[in-house]
Image (cartoon, rainbow, N blue to C red):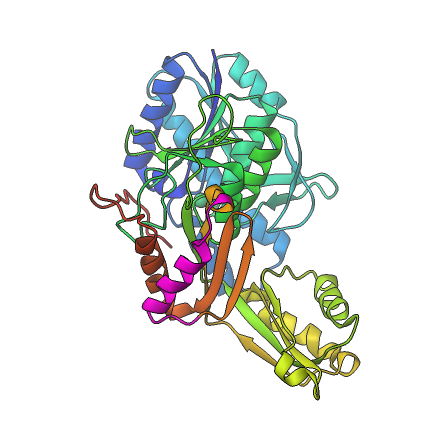
Amino acid sequence: MSIVVQKYGGSSVADAEAIKRVARRIVETRRAGHSVCVVVSAMGDTTDELLDLAEQVTPGPPARELDMLLTSGERISMALVAMAIAQHGVEARSFTGSQAGVITDAAHGAARIIDVTPGRIEDALGAGHVAIVAGFQGVSQTTKDITTLGRGGSDTTAVALAAALHADVCEIYTDVDGVFTADPRILPTARKVDVLSMEEMLDLAANGSKILHLRCVEYARRYGIPIHVRSSWSQREGTWIKDNPYQGEGAVEAPIIAGIAHDRSEAKITIVGVPDRVGVAARIFGAIADAGLNIDMIVQNVSVADAADTAKTDISFTLPQGDGAKGVQVLQGIKSDVDYHDLLLDDSIGKIALVGAGMKSHPGVSARFFRALADAGINIEMISTSEIRVSAVTRADQLDDAVRAVHTAFGLDSTEGEAIVYGGTGR
Ligand code: ASP
Ligand code: MG
């Protein structure tokens, strides 16, 4: 008998009918002889609605109270799913994150899991019950307050529980059939990918793919938990995310391109006319880091043409849009020190990232990527690469076109009809 952790996203439990459908699936898994621990998200767009509600009561609600409010969404789902399972004569018990032993740090809204002590879940499974856990939440080790793990955090709850319970697999049920070569909501010709390495999935998640929470993939890689992303509406095999699928026994060939991620949530700051001196970048990014701002791409290149007389450079970097104003404020604070000329904040940028383990050994990937963008009339503002990724910043309103053009240029368009989006509002 194996231990299975199943996570159902918001669209899979959006209403009473959906909850009953999911309950049937859980009951089938239990009746097949598995121990089943289920993690649920809040129903449909509940989390967004609660956030809107808080904003109406007060702009900038206290973080502790916001976490109290948001965690109620998952508690509604967990109780309803447990009731729906009981209807089939199978015993189910629901647990909050805190009851399930999800211990976090005290960072409200973005807490990190530091330990999982799932004694009550183990007892429930041992008694033959299905355990239902509220996702996306835990309890702070120090303050004992209820915390949330950040948007999309239920995925991380599921993998953390899978690791703590020594589960054989963590199944993530969503509203599409798996991980696609691009977001099927903007590109219906995207195709489902059968297998991805942990590294590929990490890069896709870090570059804007919404299918899995970034920390969930980090956690899965650290603890070697295989993830199976699939639809709760179909019985189809989804996408397996594993360690080393391209090596050893049962290996498949690494694809040149595993997928394309896109992201519209970043902003770009350009520091104009920075003196070309030792230590300047350290000063700038030290101040940004001290402010707790997380940056992504950085571009700097002293122009040889100008260097002789001016010895100035421009530095651009990207960061989350919500941190743009703070970034500008921090840099204004060191203006006299660094002696740069001007600051520009731009939040109409988009980022496209092409990820694939096979590109390591295939020349010409960047050339084909840039050619596709050029042919579509899209200007590239920043470029960054790693061994298995090429990414570029474009205008935000050209991003969808960029994804389409690159997808076609790499021959990724499906020949088997359009991808199915079963539910959700994409909000
Ligand atoms: N309900 C939370 C959200 O909408 C957490 C999750 O669904 O994973 O972000
Ligand atoms: Mg999600």
- Tell me which residue sits at (67%, 50%) in the image: 107
- Tell me which residue sits at (57%, 16%) in the image: 123
Give above or below for 424 relative to 264.
above
Instruction: Please state if 97 lies on the left or on the right of 260 as rendered.
Output: right
Give above or below for 134 relative to 211.
above
Q: Main secondary structure of the magenta part?
A: helix
Instruction: Please state if 317 lies on the left or on the right of 24 as rendered.
Output: right
- Tell me which residue sits at (56%, 22%) in the image: 121
Number of numbered discs: 0
Extreme residue toward the bottom, this view: 309
Which residues are the magenta region? 361-379
Q: Is residue 399 visible?
A: no
- Tell me which residue sits at (48%, 66%) in the image: 393
Q: Is residue 381 visible?
A: yes
Residue 23 % position (x, y): 35, 27
Tell me, yes or no, whether the highlighted magenta stretch contains residue 369.
yes
- Which quadrant, please, contains the C terminus? bottom left
Between 394 and 13, the residue placed more toward the observer is 394
Give above or below for 309 relative to 282.
below
